Image (cartoon, coloured by chain):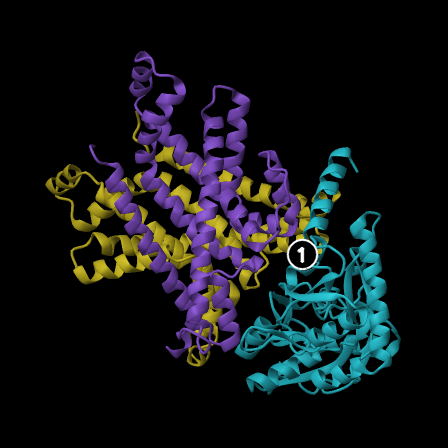
Amino acid sequence: MSMFKKTILTIFASLLLMGNVLADKVKIGTEGAYPPWNSKDESGKLIGFEVELANWLCIYMKHDCTIVEQDWDGMIPALLMRKFDAIMAGMSITAERQKTITFSQGYADEVAQLAVMKGSDLEGMDTPSGINLSLGGSDVKSALKTLTGVLAGKTVCVQTATIHQNFLDSGDVGKIDVRTYKTQDEVNLDLAAGRCDAALAAAVSFTDYAEKSGKSVVLVGPTFSGGAFGNGVGVGIRQAGDDVIGQRDAQLLEDFNKAIDTARANGKISELAIKWFGFDASM
Amino acid sequence: MGLLAYGDTGWGDEFFFATLMTIAVSVAAIFIGFFLAAIFASLKLSKIKALNLIGSFYTTVFRGVPELLVIYLFFFGGSGAVMYVAKIFGYDGYIEINAFITGAVSIGIISGAYSTEVFRGAIQSINKGQFEASQVLGFKKKIYYYKIIIPQMLRLALPNISNVWQITLKDTSLISVTGLVEIMRMSYIAAGSTRDPLFFYSFAAVLYLFLTFLSMQLFNKLEKNYSKGY
Amino acid sequence: MDLMIESLPKLLNATKLTIQLTLLSLFFGIFVGVFFAILRTGKNKFFYYIAYYYSYILRGTPLLVQIFIIYFGLGQVEWIRESFLWVVLKEPYSCAILAFTLNTGAYSSEIFRSAFETINKGVLEAAAGLGLNKIHTFFKIKLPIVIKQSLPAYGNEMILMLKGTSLASTVTLLDLTGVAKYIISTTFRPVEVFIVAGSIYLIMTFIIHSFIKYLEKKFSYPQ
């Protein structure tokens, strides 16, 4: 790194230190638009599984935390920009993301599934109830083949920059018309409007939408996990570095991991998962 | 209509503040633009070819590239870009990275490109005689610029500045992608929450029309003022 | 640097959509523009005001709001989904072209209107004197003058429309800006992508600019 860049970074880092990085204050970023993981109530307050879990983890870490809202597509850049120090936004741990940031251990599992409107010809697919892409094997292959056939030429809607989009773009289900949207909400709206033949997202977000909107959204096909879908949801943190902030990040990672261990051991994660998802999605 | 009630039951108060935010970002942006325009217009009017080129580069790029792309550049490039730009103008300090600054600077840079052309055109259209007469009368450059040229330039530029203002005002709707809660963003949130996009986006259109109308009144008044004696 | 080279094919591929959107919108927009310009210069007060308010509303509100009303707003209205309008409003592609056409139509109508108004009365009198009927006058005399008068301002409008198509990315379309944003958000290298995508836009701007200059030459009277 050139001398010039080093100077800028040092000034920036030291000013940032003087600003808000002092000791225990930790800012956690979440989307606020991905129920039941995180969303907002009528008054605009952030609520959800992760909002509650974050507060508990902070108690265990003995850190003073604030939860900050951030649009999904700017989530990682905002973390890198130091707008906040950790991401808890239903973000799955994937190898792709690990190139830029690091993750704590996973705290909850997220399975994805396709959703259609009732009466769609995609209902009643002949596939196993769930496939794990990391495990591979012949039943995964045949399920993918069935899906490719059924989805050929169809329009499938996803939220942008998600594991769901990555999966559809990967070619594992052949050539389909992938439409990307800024938020899951927009995906749901267009699915209900009949603009999408199907949509792909976390199964729980569809059940949540069906419940809240009263629309007849139906889950079809197998549940997906592994492979492009990553290994559970974890806390996103900046990668450790040599400078003051970088070392603080390394410490933060450790603290989160310890806190997650605590929350798992005392059943807190399971409790919150059952409250928000209706089943124990903890990892 | 109850949706727009002021207070907790309706969105009226949120939209009021969102409108203030739109005005605030637009004003910040246009002044950032004026600041840049003053610099780049002089570059374009300079006798040195290289400076002309720098000026042209600025106006060509920021009037030719879509606003969204410029906004993404600053939104994803974040603090680094903003601080780098500020450093060029001598501001070395820490700038808090927030959506307002990102938005105002991105739109400001674009607005400045348009304003540069307006300033340049206005100065060039001032009768050469004015410059010569001032010099003959022995006025120093600084003085005649401030007292004679610039007032005339403002008068000539005003109608076009009014256009630049309209453009800037409407461009602020694009900052909604960065999360800043101005009119567009507010209608996005309200539409999502109430599942009534048609009502809220139409309402946003009404708000913008209102601001456009007010602006036109304001500029008409300004033009009348500045044209006194002509 | 290698990102710039890597991203080029994807960006160029997306440029095709951008060009389509621009050309189609401009094409339909001209008809809309001429139509409203005629309404504005006509004698009928009612039509005059329809044209006036059409132009006022579409130029006084951001294009983003317009495209959102058409795509997201109308898309949620039940009876629209069941009507023949759904043929156009279902697809983001046609929604975008509709929004862009209406928008450029408004700006174009202003340009054409002002060109119509500056036609020298003397020319029209001469045409009448020569016995040319209304249709002839319109196509052989008025139109060429309007075209020549409008060229500089319309060239500007063409560039504005080109930039406007970038908003198609907000309604799921993968145009040049949409793909650029995708690449930026996955590689976190905004500067490089901006340079490549921006340059493509600038090249297109340059082409439009040169085309207009060429037309200006063609339509000018031999000196």
Q: Pick the residue in front: B4 or C138.
A: B4
Q: Is C155 situated left or right of B191 in this image?
A: left
Quadrant of residue C39 in the image? bottom left
* Chain C as rendered: colour: yellow
Q: Residue at x 71, y 69 (%)?
A: A164
Q: Pick the residue in front: A68 or A231.
A: A68
Q: Position of residue B76 (x, y in %)?
A: 64, 52
* On screen, residue A148 above or below B175: below
* On screen, residue A137 above or below A235: below
Q: Residue at x 54, y 59 (%)?
A: B180
Q: Residue at x 47, y 22 (%)?
A: B46
Read off the chain for label 1.
A
Q: Which chain did the renderer colour cyan? A: A
Q: Pick the residue in front: C185 or C108.
A: C185
Quadrant of residue B5 in the image? bottom left
Quadrant assignment for the N terminus of chain A? top right
* On screen, residue A276 above or below B170: below
Quadrant assignment for the C terminus of chain A? bottom right
Is residue C1 among the parts visible in the rendering?
A: no
Is residue C15 among the parts visible in the rendering?
A: yes
* Chain B as rendered: colour: purple
Task: Report the number of numbered marks.
Answer: 1
Q: Position of residue A19 (x, y in %)?
A: 68, 51
Q: Which residue is mark 1?
A: A83
Q: Position of residue B154 (x, y in %)?
A: 34, 34
Q: Residue at x 47, y 54 (%)?
A: B172
Q: Is A50 situated left or right of B19 in this image?
A: right
Amino acid at dot 1: Lys
Estimate how packed mark 1 is, as few (under 14), some (14 to 19) or many (20 or more) residues with alpha carbons within 10 Å: many
Q: Position of residue C220 (x, y in %)?
A: 32, 32
Q: Is A89 situated left or right of B183 in this image?
A: right
SS for dot 1:
loop
